[in-house]
Image (cartoon, coloured by chain):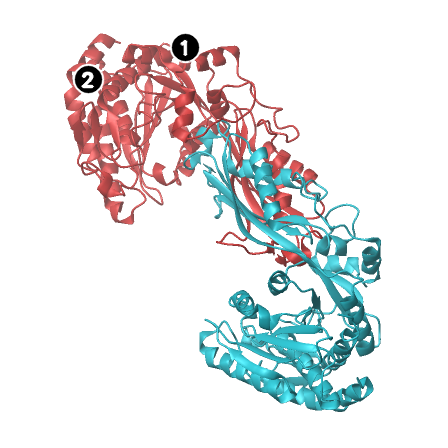
Chain colours: A red, B cyan
């Protein structure tokens, strides 16, 4: 492939690409608003038009019970070349509070290095990065280095509610060797990074019942157990005072950090004092023996997400409540099975629950973690591509949260997912004045162009 | 005093007294309802009329910012005789849900041994017991064995909001040697009892703040402390798994149960299995070494009355909350000072709070416990009177709750309070179909008539 010519084309068209992006950003494709339904449709048609314009084939708008999914492909790279599925979304978040926007959210405005508009970072700008790199290859080389399938959905901001079924129904069409998702952020300004791991989740609810009705705490206090106190005792037995989880067998399947990974973590520029100041906490808290970034992304943890019971109003009500409850979730690391963890949690809570109360445990939600090995060919290719796109070696990061579509692709297509994010953590993805750094937009197009080329070197 | 003639008079007038009571019960003196304001006034006038009719002197309706207080006295027993202040209230609870009443709440109806009407047990019937015993003495003996002051208020069901000021403003008028309150229940059917102790209260609120905003539990879980988990740790350190309170110095001033008191407790007919069944709990809970009744009334305890934090709705929200809070109250025993306990609690919570969160402690409410020594002359007199009124020896009980007016009388008038209750625990004091057992009404009149006589034997 003539990569110099491709990058030349990209650099020559820098301004044109931004002008084109504005057109995409002008469409108010807010998926959650009923009154924007036709705008979302219009946006799907715009995406389909772009796909055809840049040279993808078999472009099609797939109807779903909600907003459409747009698909296009280019499969002429050759059967010996890997196939990459690119995922992104064309729908955007609502814009309220509108009065906090400096310029209207759907009238893209360039100020300094940034383009301001709803969807600029999340995710239209990043979708456009893929479109423009594919376009550049096809313009110069009349082919792509790898086979490419592109799936752009319109319901990411409302939970990708129809995506799983679509993937299942179209497994053959979507079959691929790698999935590339550009819907996340770089670690920091001028710190290009590759996210290679996500945490999983097991989200539980614990409900404690003491006496069959609310009692007068004067008449009964001291005689019967109190479900709030009992719940507190249960919560305390789940995690010790240093953040170690005490559930039997909880750590059995944990994939430990390798020395190489910990070395990579240590390269990340992280200012703990600034982090604490930003959160206004005097001390951080968590499992001993790990750094803050490791604890927040590569170690499992347990948190109460909510708790309730008894009287929550103003003043003093002397009630001994009948019931109390808590939402308790565990962030899991790759290799921990959410269903197994749910069972370990449930068994353990039953084991430690006092006989003086009745305890019910429910599982509300779960999901697998994900990891792409650092030393895999797709990862080497990503590093090489980012190096060429950004002029500096990218760092490796793991995210502490889960990205549901990543789980879906992993589980349903059984393909590794590579997260190449070109947003920045402070670009207000879901807030007023969302913006995208145009230098990263340009470097993103270059990186993806290189990535397609680097992936073509991997032996099938 | 001719006690035989007095009891003869009471027995002869049994039916008349009940008929008279009906008139009192017909007045819908619901103190909390604005639309019953004139009924409450009418009831105060009725009480004042009764006082005059039975022979009390200096009867007066005292205005307050709310409902009036009615006062009358008879001070001709002689300066060498003790003075007794009788307290009761003429206001009643609301009647909803009205459809659950078998007969209308203000149309007194006799069914079996009971008279059904709002206020029959709480407290008009018990007020009438005092009126009729005073009347019987004055009819027969033309005097009373002791000096008597009677204070009947109209705001007990709305927290006696103007009573403390009235007592303070009229200390000289209300000066007395003993206060008798008939506004409680006997231990059980056919188990006449004298309540000689009440618990005090220290009611606190603990607020825990972690990070300055709600965080995504995926991105931050494991890195920072969670205020709900931290609050659970604090709660667990306040009381051990056997119900013993761990606050430094908490038990220092506790008045321990005497062997005599524990013996009295053991006489109370209490069916623990039935108690557990009624509450639907498989096991009771509390401080080791004490019986359930002792724990519920004569030992201090600590209960969470409410707890909150984070997400309480349906489903799963992956939030690491910024704040959590709990209402935590301690029931105190006589001799424990609520203000001292508040300070011990606050200091202890501050001591055990982790540096990873900020903890604020507030005091919401407090009150002293009360105890009348079992071997005091007023208590001996009460036993003797109940024995004569009921034909059996009364048992001694302590109540686990607080009765605010008892605190007021103790503190402001510095007089021991004797609680002689003639209601029953299942007479639906605040519910539909409130009723009073008419046998106890009659035996109550006899007991109080005897009590006035027995008290007159105490040397001043």
Question: Does residue B378 lie above or below B371 as drawn?
Answer: below
The residue that appears at 80% across and 59% down in the rendered structure is B265
* Chain for numbered disc 2: A
Q: Quadrant of residue A36?
A: top left
| Secondary structure under the numbered disc 1 in the rendered image | loop
Q: Quadrant of residue B170?
A: bottom right
Instruction: Out of B239 and B200, give the one closest to the viewer.
Output: B200
Question: Does residue B210 lie above or below B419 as drawn?
Answer: above
Residue holding disc 2: A139
Where does the N terminus of chain B fall, quadrant-wise? bottom right
Instruction: Out of B101 and B80, give the one closest to the viewer.
Output: B80
- Mark 2 nearby-residue class (10 Å; few <14, some 14–19, many ≥20): some
Where does the C terminus of chain B fall, quadrant-wise? bottom right
Q: Is residue B347 visible?
A: yes
Residue holding disc 1: A459
The residue that appears at 73% across and 81% down in the rendered structure is B445
The residue that appears at 60% across and 24% down in the rendered structure is A253
The image position of residue B260, as x and y in percent, is: 84, 57
Instruction: Out of B435 and A137, give the one closest to the viewer.
Output: B435
- Mark 1 nearby-residue class (10 Å; few <14, some 14–19, many ≥20): few
The image position of residue A306, as x and y in percent, is: 51, 42
Q: Is residue A376 visible?
A: no
The image position of residue B194, as x and y in percent, is: 75, 67
Instruction: Out of B373 and A439, give the one closest to the viewer.
Output: B373
**Are circles 1 and 2 on residues that touch, CB within 8 Å?**
no
The image position of residue B319, as x and y in percent, is: 46, 38
Mark carried by residue A329: none
Question: Does residue A280 lie above or below A262 as drawn?
Answer: below
């Amino acid at each position: 492939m003539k990569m110099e010519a491709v990058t030349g084309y990209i650099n020559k068209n820098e301004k044109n690409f931004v002008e084109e992006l504005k057109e995409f950003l002008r469409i108010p494709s807010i998926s959650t608003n009923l009154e924007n339904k036709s705008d979302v449709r219009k946006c799907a048609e715009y995406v389909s038009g772009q796909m055809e314009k840049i040279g993808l084939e078999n472009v099609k708008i797939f109807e779903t019970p909600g907003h459409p999914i747009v698909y296009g492909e280019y499969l002429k790279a050759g059967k010996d070349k890997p196939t990459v599925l690119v995922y992104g979304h064309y729908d955007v978040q609502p814009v309220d509070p509108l009065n906090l926007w400096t310029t209207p959210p759907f009238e893209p405005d360039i100020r300094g290095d940034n383009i301001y508009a709803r969807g600029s970072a999340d995710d239209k700008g990043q979708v456009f990065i893929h479109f423009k790199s594919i376009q550049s290859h096809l313009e110069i080389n009349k082919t792509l280095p790898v086979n490419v399938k592109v799936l752009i959905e319109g319901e990411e901001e409302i939970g990708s509610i129809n995506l799983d079924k679509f993937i299942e129904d179209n497994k053959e069409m979507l079959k691929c060797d790698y999935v590339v998702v550009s819907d996340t952020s770089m670690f920091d300004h001028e710190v290009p990074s590759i996210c290679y791991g996500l945490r999983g989740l097991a989200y539980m609810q614990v409900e404690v019942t003491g006496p069959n009705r609310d009692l007068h705490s004067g008449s009964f206090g001291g005689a019967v157990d109190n479900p709030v106190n009992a719940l507190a005792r249960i919560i305390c037995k789940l995690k010790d005072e240093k953040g170690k989880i005490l559930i039997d067998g909880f750590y059995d399947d944990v994939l430990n950090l390798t020395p190489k990974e910990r070395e990579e973590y240590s390269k990340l520029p992280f200012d703990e004092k600034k982090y604490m100041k930003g959160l206004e906490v005097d001390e951080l808290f968590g499992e001993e023996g790990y750094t803050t970034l490791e604890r927040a992304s590569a170690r499992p943890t347990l948190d109460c997400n909510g708790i309730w019971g008894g009287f929550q109003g103003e003043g003093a009500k002397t009630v001994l409540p009948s019931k109390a409850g808590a939402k308790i979730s565990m962030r899991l690391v790759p290799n921990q099975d959410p269903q197994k963890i749910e069972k370990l949690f449930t068994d353990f809570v039953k084991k430690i629950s006092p006989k003086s109360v009745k305890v019910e445990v429910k599982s509300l939600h779960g999901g697998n973690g994900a990891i792409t090995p650092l030393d895999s060919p797709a990862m080497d290719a990503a590093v090489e591509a980012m190096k060429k796109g950004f002029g500096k070696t990218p760092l490796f990061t793991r995210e502490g949260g889960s990205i549901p579509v990543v789980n879906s692709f992993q589980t349903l297509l059984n393909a590794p997912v590579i997260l190449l994010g070109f947003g920045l953590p402070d670009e207000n993805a879901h807030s007023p004045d969302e913006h995208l750094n145009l230098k990263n937009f340009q470097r993103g197009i270059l990186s993806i162009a290189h990535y397609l080329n680097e992936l073509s070197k991997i032996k099938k």
